[in-house]
Image (spheres, rainbow, N blue to C red):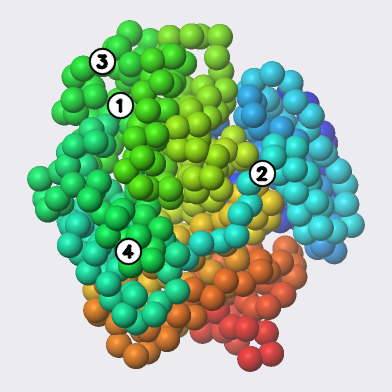
């Protein structure tokens, strides 16, 4: 552990933090504010790093890999790990009287960690994160434009619905590169190769038909998880991550029940992952959305106790990459961020978008801002703007439709502003038949790839996130701010 004391009043500082995985919060807040932590323990495993949780205390901010403290003049301090291959780097900034104590703790073998005082925090954050990306051989291919089935069909997706949208996209000449089937095609969590009862076919039959229409076929997997009801779990209970009691450890709660995670220090598990990726690639899916990846990095009892969490995680990613092939496009999701650099092509950098603004009670009463909604997605992905040096960022889908959505005009345009600011992947789940002229125009605009924007200041924020960019300003508040309506994005000079 290393420790520094900054002789500056906590009341004068903002802090920029980034949570552990895709869905964890990233924020820009006054240092004296309180960092929230979910009340419910199962949310710790599923949305955070249970080994290094948000503090829950006022004046104490925890961050993974990178932290910045910003003075009113825009200068300040930046800390950033320069390697994340086997080591998790944990930062804490703690108000301590009339100063701030910053500690850095490493979980794993020692690595080089940068710490600098700077006249320009924005520039230093970008330079150091780029250095981390360079050292870990970040993959940053051109952003793709993806239609994904999740955010309108959810688990009721069918083979016909995907094909129907692909046909319409071709007819309307929409510039999608990829058509990606999300959760709902499989027999069970872990039983990826057998069809689910409601999908209306085998997902294996889709690639040829999508390719005929000119789209790259994409498939969702949560490759490190197994449901208690799955064949994978029944056949290989010994493959699961265990608790101290020696029993398979429930590591989260979704799909109506608890689920388990694979112990990726077992050679036979790595072989199974390699085969899985090779099989679906062989079916014709060169684009894979790999979800709930945190499952391979959870604390627990492993077959090989000599392999640390970060290493166990990266070995598992390497196995998937090997099976899928060097030219496959891998999108990480629900994934420890920096630990994924070099293996994934793209990464979800925030919680799920949803066709509504937010579930405020969950955030404010339960202390959980990892839940789905437009607000949480915008808040977190904007505050990770610098991560385009680590992978192609995926701030999640545009929602252009007016039907099946509670978002208003201003909120839809904020989502467009998010995509244009982050500059990464473009995606939509809109059932294309629902889009009127205005919806189609908005969807087309959202598929226009743009270079990432940069913040113009970190000393102001309209809602606890990085909101002031060179090309425009976001207002995440429920009241007007800076002449921008609540929940609105305005281009500068507009
Ligand atoms: C499919 C979905 C979609 C979506 C992913 C992911 O923290 N959680 O409980 C939580 C559950 C699901 C979730 C995100 C967070 O959604 O992000 O795009 O693929 O899985 O089930």
Query: Label 1 neighbourhood size at 10 Å, few (<14), some (14-19), many (20+)?
Result: many
> Which mark is drawn over residue 354?
none
The spot of residue 54 in percent (x, y) is: 54, 39
| Relative vertical location of residue 316 with respect to residue 467 in this rendering, above or below | above
Q: Mark 4–mark 2 contact, CB under 8 Å?
A: no
SS at badge 4:
helix
Q: Which residue is mark 3?
A: 237
Residue at image coords 43%, 21%: 270
Instruction: Give the CA separation, mark 3 to mark 1.
Output: 10 Å
User: Which circle, 1 or 2, is nearer the viewer?
Assistant: 2
| Relative vertical location of residue 186 with respect to residue 371 in this rendering, above or below | above
Query: Label 4 neighbourhood size at 10 Å, few (<14), some (14-19), many (20+)?
Result: few
> Which mark is drawn over residue 138?
2
The spot of residue 164 in percent (x, y) is: 22, 69
The spot of residue 19 in percent (x, y) is: 56, 44
Question: Mark 3 or mark 1, which has the lower sequence index?
Answer: 3
User: Which circle, 4 or 3, is nearer the viewer?
Assistant: 4
Residue at image coords 60%, 87%: 483
Instruction: Give the CA separation, mark 4 to mark 1.
Output: 38 Å
Q: Mark 4–mark 1 contact, CB under 8 Å?
A: no
Residue at image coords 60%, 64%: 422
Residue at image coords 45%, 80%: 444
């Amino acid at each position: 552990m290393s420790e520094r004391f900054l002789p500056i009043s906590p009341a004068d500082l903002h802090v920029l933090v980034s949570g552990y995985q895709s869905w964890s919060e990233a924020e820009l807040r006054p240092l004296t504010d309180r960092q929230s932590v979910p009340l419910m323990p199962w949310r710790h495993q599923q949305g955070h790093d249970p080994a290094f949780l948000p503090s829950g205390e006022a004046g104490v901010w925890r961050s993974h890999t990178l932290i910045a403290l910003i003075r009113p003049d825009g200068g300040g301090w930046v800390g950033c790990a320069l390697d994340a291959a086997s080591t998790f780097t944990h930062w804490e900034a703690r108000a301590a009287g009339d100063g701030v104590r910053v500690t850095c703790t490493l979980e794993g073998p020692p690595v080089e960690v940068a710490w600098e005082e700077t006249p320009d925090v924005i520039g230093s954050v970008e330079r150091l994160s780029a250095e981390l990306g360079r050292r870990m051989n970040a993959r940053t291919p051109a952003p793709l434009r993806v239609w994904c089935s999740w955010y309108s069909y959810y688990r009721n997706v069918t083979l016909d619905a995907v094909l129907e949208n692909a046909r319409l996209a071709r007819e309307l000449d929409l510039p999608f590169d990829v058509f990606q089937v999300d959760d709902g095609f499989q027999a069970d969590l872990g039983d990826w190769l057998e069809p689910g009862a409601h999908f209306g076919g085998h997902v294996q039959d889709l690639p040829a038909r999508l390719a005929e229409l000119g789209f790259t076929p994409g498939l969702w997997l949560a490759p490190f998880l197994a449901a208690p009801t799955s064949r994978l779990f029944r056949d290989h209970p010994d493959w699961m991550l265990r608790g101290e009691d020696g029993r398979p450890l429930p590591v989260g709660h979704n799909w109506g029940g608890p689920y388990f995670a694979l112990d990726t220090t077992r050679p036979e598990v790595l072989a199974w992952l390699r085969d899985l990726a090779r099989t679906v690639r062989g079916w014709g899916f060169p684009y894979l959305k790999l979800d709930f990846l945190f499952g391979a990095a959870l604390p627990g009892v492993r077959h090989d106790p000599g392999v640390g969490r970060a290493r166990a995680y990266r070995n598992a990613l390497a196995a998937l990459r090997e099976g899928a092939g060097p030219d496959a496009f891998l999108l990480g999701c629900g994934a420890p961020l920096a630990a994924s650099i070099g293996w994934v092509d793209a990464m979800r950098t925030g919680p799920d978008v949803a066709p509504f603004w937010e579930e405020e009670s969950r955030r404010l009463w339960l202390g959980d801002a990892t839940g789905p909604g437009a607000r949480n997605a915008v808040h977190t992905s904007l505050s990770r703007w610098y991560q385009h040096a680590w992978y192609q960022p995926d701030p999640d889908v545009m929602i252009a439709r007016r039907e099946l959505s509670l978002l208003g005009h201003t909120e839809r345009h904020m989502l467009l502003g998010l995509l244009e600011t982050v500059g990464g992947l473009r995606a939509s789940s809109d059932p294309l038949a629902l889009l009127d002229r205005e919806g189609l125009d908005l969807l087309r605009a959202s598929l226009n790839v743009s270079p990432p924007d940069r913040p113009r200041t970190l000393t102001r924020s309209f809602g606890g996130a990085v909101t002031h960019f060179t090309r425009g300003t976001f207002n995440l508040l429920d009241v007007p701010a800076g002449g921008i309506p609540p929940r609105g994005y305005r281009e500068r000079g507009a």
